[in-house]
Image (spheres, rainbow, N blue to C red):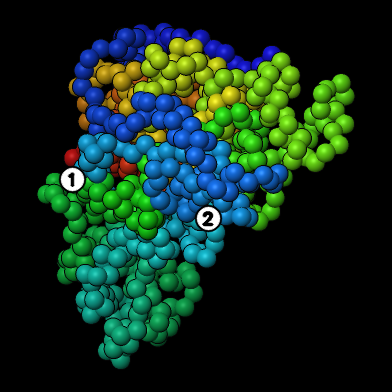
Amino acid sequence: MKPRTVSIAIAIVCICSAALIFSEVHQLELFDLIPSSITHGSFSSSFDTIEFEGASEFLILLRTAHRKKIANPPPHCQEQHSKVNVFNRAIEIDWIGRNISAVEPTWSSFNRSSCNFVGLAFPPTKGALHAALQQTTYISSFHTVSQCISDSFQWENDKPFTCLGNNFGGTLGANTEKGCIEEAVGGYQMKLWNEQNSNDALFQCLKYYLDTDEVLREVDITTHMEDMIANVTRLDYVSQRGYSRDDTDWSTLAFLLWSETALKLTGILEAANITTSEQIIRNLQRMMAVIGSGKNTTVTKCVAELLPPMIGNKSYTPEEQRVWKDTGAYLSTSTMQESPSSLLRNLPGSLHGVLPPSPTAIYSVHALLGEVVNVNSEAYFPGCTPYWNAILRQEAPPKKAFIETDLEAKKNGTIFANWKNSRHYLRNEIIKTCAEDDSKCPFPTFDLVIDITQVYCGGFFHWMIEIWPRIGPFLDGLLSENMPKFAIRIGCESSQIGFHPQFFGLVGFENITLIDSESPVFAKEVIAPTEGFSHSPLLNYWNLVAMRQKVFSHLGPIEKSENKTVLVIIRDASRRPDANIFNRKFLNELSDGLPDIYRVVPFRSSDKKMMACMACQARAFMLADVIIGSHGAGLSHTLFAPAGAAILERVDKSDSGIYSELAFMLGMKYFPMDVNTHHSGSYIDMITLANG
């Protein structure tokens, strides 16, 4: 039977000009920015080398482990039974919660170990682990308050883990809503503000104002003072949105909001006959004008001293302090060893409590690959959603294990037509027939298949961050001369296979056979590398850094100029357009407002030439010093940006924290930006802070 595959000779050629063409506002045409040839030069990755013990010989090790198990099977594997046991990797039973040297446990109702699957862990070498832990990282606010309190972040500890995780919004930072708010934009600042300023100090500033206000000075505030100091509660956050430059600095705004609450609760406004919303707003506007004008120097000085100092491990320049005062943005350096991930610190298998467990791979022989991986008397659920559905229904029989073989019994003219025995026997008989004689197998057959089947294969983010990187730790072995011919089953329908082949070219594959998911196939040998986990780059850490290193090795190093590149992702051909935000006016203002060393470069989704060349896209991000973009799959390219780059993500309340994770783990500087701001000055502020 002829296999249904996509066999592709990958030769990715970027037709790029080396000339730098400037527009009137010094914006560069993106394709002209990318070098047509690779030259040696300065380029910074997270760390230079990462290796995994045994990964270059992973196939030999897996084959050897399987032979040993078959030669010396556990006692229960010698029993005769027809029940299909459901097997899943032990490393995922506790949601990547433990390290293993061999996979044994199963989720069968008999709680038996697998008889026909083996699995091995391939831990990073001591040098690679040390380098990862010592990697420089940057701490800022990774979320906004609106994200923390939205449905994107789920804090119910009693909820089971699913494909998306208990808290799929983000695994970086605190694991409670209160903790998330205290670390978020607007919440972190108020935490420091509240710690520094007592109600007594705030009342004193307010009293200075009330003594001179033409309306409120007639009110006897002494009768209200005690209540104000004792009972006025503090705000948890001063803003729900991301970073932005407003008319009033955040500390002054915090004082105004506290004052409004204090004046309401203590009855001072009512005593002055200020009761309507309009009257209250006018009162705050008067107060804001007095503080901002500096006419009442006592009030202005008192309120200015409420601003807490920046916290960090460096000396800040006057400009950085100005950005802190205006926006509340801050940045401090750290290392991966001090990673603020409550989730990973609570996983028993995490490495040093901050990195996910080692990459793994499972292996078996004579396998029918459909919605599940079928071998003799066992079934393995590959892919995030099928896997978690199976786990959450662990007592139910694995119905999907019989889908493909049941269909064969319903076909006319085949050796399995009108099968009368049980579906268990039919399934095993088909597997046995395929193993013995290719010509009688009703499915396409392959000698060796690397199965990375997973849900959302057609989605760019899911493919790039979760699925494709699964082969990363094993690339040295896969690309070696002694590796036998193999195919990769990617789990997409043939109509969805578009950008996928070029990704394999990024890491050095010249010819690759890709198998779609439209029909099952039979593999004499099958390997399933560690699965990715939806919406969590941090949990995919080892896969991603391994793949990133191989892309850099294959495409770079690239010669960078002395100028700094600000890459602006513009979705002008997308289901979620933002060209009205990142428009020509924004680009012009951004270019004019930055020092001459910066060059603003649009990265447009409407650029068909660029979108058709994955290597060109990767190189564009390898050259970027600053990346600006709305939450969306385009920011997945952050994987290719250099360590130390600044990532300015325009986020809404329903957006997850996946790109803050990706930036943090790769040693980049991340800033969540207010989705509603059109002000280029807000972005200039963050670039100023990021680059000192």
The quarter of the picture where the C terminus appears is top left
Circle 2 or circle 1, nearest the eye: 2
Regarding mark 2 in the picture, which secondary structure is present there?
loop
Residue 393 position in % (x across, y down): 64, 54
Q: Residues within 10 Å of mark 1 (few under 14, many from 20)?
A: few
Residue 179 position in % (x across, y down): 37, 63
Under mark 1, the amino acid is: Glu
Q: In this view, does 691 lie above or below 241?
A: above
Residue 459 position in % (x across, y down): 56, 33
According to the image, label 1 marks what residue?
Answer: 319
Q: How crowded is mark 2: few (under 14 residues within 10 Å), some or many (20 or more)?
A: some
Regarding mark 1 in the picture, which secondary structure is present there?
helix
Is 506 on the left or on the right of 323, as rendered? Answer: right
Give the mark nearest the N terminus, 2 or 1. Answer: 2
Residue 161 is labelled as 2
Residue pictured at 31% horizontal, 20% vertical: 553
